[in-house]
Amino acid sequence: MKMDIHAWQIETDSPVTGFTESIFSVGNGYLGIRGYDLQTPKTGMDQHAIFRAGFFEPVRPGITDMVQLPDVLGLTVEGCAPGSMHQTLDLQHGIFTQTWHDCGLSVSAERMASMADPQLLCVRMTICSASTQTVTVHARMDDRVANLPVHDDQMVDETETVRLLETLEQTDHHLEMQAVHSKRTLCFLQQVLVGGQAASGSTLRLSLQPGCPVRIEKRVRVLLDEEPARPETQDPWQAHCMAWEALWRDCDIVLDADADIQGALRWNIFQMLCSNAWDDPHISIGARGLTHGRYKGNAFWDTDIFLLPFFCWQRPEAARNLMLYRVLHLPQARELARRQNLSGARFPWMCASDGTEQCESWDIGLCEVHITADVAYALSRMLDITGTEMTGDMRMLFLETARYWESRLTWEEGRQQYSSFFVKGPDEYCGAAVNNTYTNYMARHNVELALAHASDFMDAKEQKRLRFLAEHITILYDPERCLYRQDELFERLEPLPQTRSAGEPLYRSICFDRMQRYRALKQADLVQLMVLFPDKFTEKEKRAVWETYEPLTVHDSSLSFGMHALLAFQLGLQTEAWAYFRRALLFDLHDELRNTGREGVHMAALGAAWQALVYGALGVWTREDRLCIKPNLPPQIRSVSLPLRFRGERYRLTADHQGAGLVKEA
């Protein structure tokens, strides 16, 4: 399905599908609404999805799911069933509009999740008639709702829904529901206005005259538990638009480039903002944000490695709270390490709102141990960029994660080295590895962070042990090729007999067991390592990694294109960099893996594309307490302008093919 992408707008003429529902999702960080059709009745209780960030309930012992809320936005013209709609997402003001014609009517329905009031969802409908007629509009809240938990295994299609909410009371203007297990309560307060005047009920009989449009507005306040209702504003739409204007002043990147590139970049930024509860350290961002319940709404390393840089540089308070989410869940990370017979703290691969591990795939959940070092790396980068004062709890996170590595790595007497067994790096296709270089390098960095920032919490013996550990972790490097090796097994695997073409990923046509025995990478692994530490590797080493591993990467992951674009920009490979950047930027808008509809927006792809531009094409980095830039713009981008926040100061970065400037702003 083709999306028309403009500088500030995404639009299409089409039926409403799962794909359009994902692309036209809107949110305010606390509430997210998929772009479903108000006019089409649900055929399943898991349709017409609305989500509330941080609200999770058990679906079976030890496993939770992000609760789907009921469709409280219902505003339906009786008797009409349009087959197709003009759908428009206004990125500048955060408003999604569906326009259709049927029954002699022209109808425009706008919706938003208020950025000025995180409790508020609004929809307004404007109806025009070509003749005199009476129509009935229903403004009901539909309490029929259930979750459709999605299995960890992407090859398994779930069909069994789970009821997580039950209705306690419902009237025309009030719906109260209760969580089946925790007994937490949700209250929905509905206000309906016709022509600006309050309506008495939820069924409206409207007398229409030619040339005289009628507007119906519906405002729904969503209250969780004992949350008090915020004061009402006279015009919530105006307040919402003003809030988005303020966000864009902090976050907009202005390109002199084709309109589709500018619009796609803004859509990426828009969706990151829509899924971030910026002022709440108890809420992270799930792998699909608030656009879908895929992966049970859980947070992965996607948030720490791919999304966090955007927030560090453009929304530093949000970045601090995203890292506080990890710090606050250090007790659960300690408990996870203890359950795995290890010391220190081990962060979950799939992290629920309460900090517990939710991964039900035993090999992934136990092997993807790099997540622990990723969290420590992300915390150090946040502190460096934002200038946040380090707390005792943050120092303890560095120490406890270092203690984890001391217990997780194996001392090999014959080698006089520590090795990692049964691990997976970012690539997930090559089985459980021995000495995955990404994992070991990140573990070493983690231990070094503890020695640098948490030495006051250690005695002399522990300091000595950790220093010895850092100096003796195996890092596989071939000096003749100037090449960091993927792991000890990778080069012994059988070559992949086919390459990935456009369409669905290889795991849908090749058994996962067979896939893990091919010498093929699902996504960036050592390429990822190169871009996380741009000053630690020589250009020759980076080129060796690119030339060796880029041809073997099939990019069956949303995380991959942006990281390849970033490294290609740094290496001056402009043709390759632009091709990868464009695919990263348009990953969901072009439905790269044919799964955006059934899985939602890929949050990591959004952040990876942002990094490719800012870290890659603009060369932004921190060095010795300084903000540095080294632009290498591709020909397709003639100039760039964006605001950056660095250690409490605001800067304006501008760059074109003649040079660059960095100016401090008030």
Image: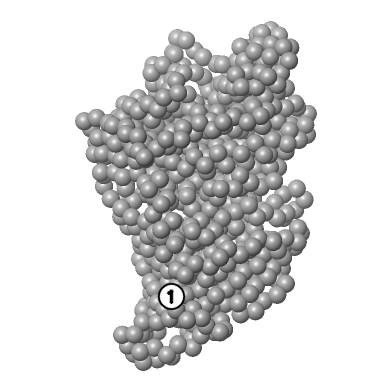
Residue 131 position in % (x across, y down): 34, 90
Residue denoted by label 1 = 125
Q: Does dot 1 land on a helix, a strand or a loop?
A: strand
Task: Identify the residue at image location x=50%, y=31%.
Answer: 387
The amino acid type found where label 1 is placed reads Met
Residue 104 position in % (x across, y down): 36, 85
Task: Identify the residue at image location x=69%, y=68%.
Answer: 177
Q: Residue furthest front?
A: 666
Is any part of residue 197 visible from this angle?
A: yes
Left or right placement of residue 309 versus residue 294 in this view: left
Q: Residue furthest left?
A: 658
Residue nearest the observer in this picture, 398 or 588: 398
Left or right placement of residue 582 versus residue 332 in this view: left
Is any part of residue 589 visible from this angle?
A: no
**218 relative to 394, above or below:** below
Residue 107 position in % (x across, y down): 39, 77
Quarter holding residue 148 = bottom right
Quarter holding residue 228 = bottom right
Within 10 angstroms of label 1, few (less than 14), some, or many (20 or more) residues?
many
Residue 658 position in % (x across, y down): 21, 30
Quarter holding residue 57 = bottom right
Q: Quadrant of the N terminus?
A: bottom left
Residue nearest the observer in this picture, 172 or 351: 172
Task: Identify the residue at image location x=67%, y=64%.
Answer: 186
**389 relative to 248, above or below:** above
Task: Identify the residue at image location x=49%, y=53%.
Answer: 274
Left or right placement of residue 281 versus residue 641 in this view: right
Residue nearest the observer in this picture, 273 or 362: 273
Q: Quadrant of the C terminus?
A: top left
